[in-house]
Amino acid sequence: MIYVLCLILFMVGLYGALTQKNLIKIIVGVAIMEYAVNVFLILLGYRAVGGVAPIIERAGDPAFAGASVDPLPQAMVLTAIVISLGVLALLVAIALRLYHKYGTYDITEIRRLRG
Amino acid sequence: MNGLSVIVKTVTRWVAGFIFLYGLYIMAYGHLTPGGGFAGGVILACAFVLWLMAYGRKGSEQLLPYRAAANLDSVGALAFWALAILGLAAGGEFFLNVIQQRSPGQALHLFSAGIIPLCNIAIALKVCASLVVVTLLLAVLRVAVNGTDEQFKSEEAES
Amino acid sequence: MVHLLTLLLVFMIIGAILALTTKDLLSAVIAVGAVGFGCSVVFLLLKAPDVAITQIVVEVLTLVILIRATVGRREVTASGTRDRPGMAAVAALVLLFLVFGVMAMQGQPAFDFGTPVMARVERTPSAFFLANGLRKTGAANIVSSVLLDFRGYDTLGEATVLFTAIIGAVAVLRQRGRRSTASQEKGDAS
């Protein structure tokens, strides 16, 4: 099933974010988790038999409402993608600041060189 | 941050204008074709990032200085909020599509859908300015381990 | 269609595993870029062009920002993973979640790929948006009308979250306030 593959992708990201020592690898794990969740949401709203994109091409077409894919998860995922960009920019800013102060991206070293 | 070679600068001068125009198109036709404010704003920010990488810090200061980008960010956010209050002020609920109710345009044309194209423009302005601010700060911060680094020289000259 | 989507998702999983196990940081960033581009193609195949456009341009800017963090730093190789018992515990937990998730999704009509909720349940919000979108808002792009008219409050919240994240990044990266306190500390110490 396709949803199981999405779940596996999310688990790969989660495992990476929890066990890696390098800050950049942790940020990469968070990004992978976000991609997996977005794909999962769009997969839920797909219509396989005669599905069309939710954009009206001819006004007053009666078959549109019965043939279109779900527009609500698409709107929510659009919001989520832009928010993930802002969050990633903040994470990279914090990582750069930590590198400036401690000279390394390794979180075990950062914990040791306190202050 | 230094710029790149003359070939890159010449090609960027042509290509960045096209990217900017494409971003404006995606933003303006957001209520008719796929796209909208968010995608348009990010494409506009990409045009500026290309200019920053090709011309360096001084070249991008002439195009869009840091202060102007930060102020545009706030203007975009306030414009979006003002459009939402417009529905409340014109005797309805918050975020009511007043223009669609008062003077609806022709469907499937550019001047239709009331408040939605104006909201797209406000959001694109906000997203573009935010990403330009973050990219300018990330590109200019030169990080050294010993604790000495430089920020905007123009900012220090002002203060 | 299902086979194409399965192929793309397997490609994304392989890219994700490569991104997390490679030693070079730049390779990890480029692998996550490949995962993002695969994501955009998946969105295009699932008849979501709005989301595909946004995902591609956001992926490009994410790559630029991440490469800025890795290129030019002195340390460009990752240093491995944490201690063994911690890794084993996390691996066991992740496997447990995976098995539980698969078991929870078996036989549920919601996870039947190809039929959205609108086809199964009467009077969903999506059916209302699709049927009355053009008449009530005048926009031909139903996703835009959902985002900015029917659920405009969510967009206002999202603009606020983006604003706050950028202000946070500016506050972390700015230098002027810190420099004055640093020179004060130097004056006290000397």
Image (cartoon, helix red, strand yellow):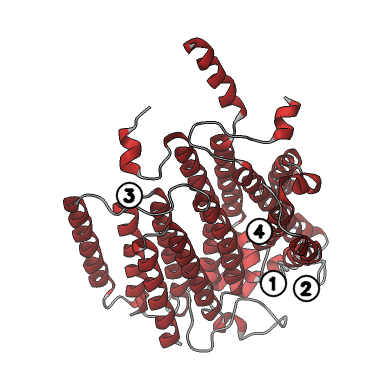
Question: Which residue is located at x 42 percent, y 52 percent?
Answer: A24
Please tell me whether mark 2 sits on a helix, a strand or a loop.
Answer: loop
Tag 1 and tag 2, C-beta contact below 8 Å: yes
Mark 2 sits on what residue? B107
Amino acid beneath label 3: Lys
Q: Which mark is residue C93?
A: none
Indicate the quadrant where residue B158 lies.
top right
Q: Position of residue B142 (x, y in %)?
A: 58, 40
Q: Which mark is residue C134?
A: 1
Q: Between B49 and C37, which is closer to the camera in this rendering?
A: B49
Q: Position of residue C105 (x, y in %)?
A: 29, 72
Amino acid beneath label 2: Ala
Q: Residue furthest left?
A: C85
Measured in 3D between alpha carbons, the distance from the residue under mark 1 to the one under mark 2, in whole angstroms, is 8 Å
Q: Are marks 3 and 4 on the same chain?
A: no
Q: Earlier in the sequence, mark 2 or mark 4?
A: 4
Q: Chain of mark 2?
A: B
Indicate the quadrant where residue C59 lies.
bottom right
Mark 4 sits on what residue? B42
Please tell me whether mark 3 sits on a helix, a strand or a loop.
Answer: loop
Q: Nearer the viewer, mark 2 or mark 3?
A: 3
Q: Between C119 and C113, which is closer to the camera in this rendering?
A: C113
Q: Nearer the viewer, mark 3 or mark 4?
A: 3
Amino acid beneath label 1: Leu
Q: Nearer the viewer, mark 1 or mark 3?
A: 3
Measured in 3D between alpha carbons, the distance from the residue under mark 1 to the one under mark 3, in whole angstroms, is 52 Å
Mark 3 sits on what residue? A21
Please tell me whether mark 4 sits on a helix, a strand or a loop.
Answer: helix
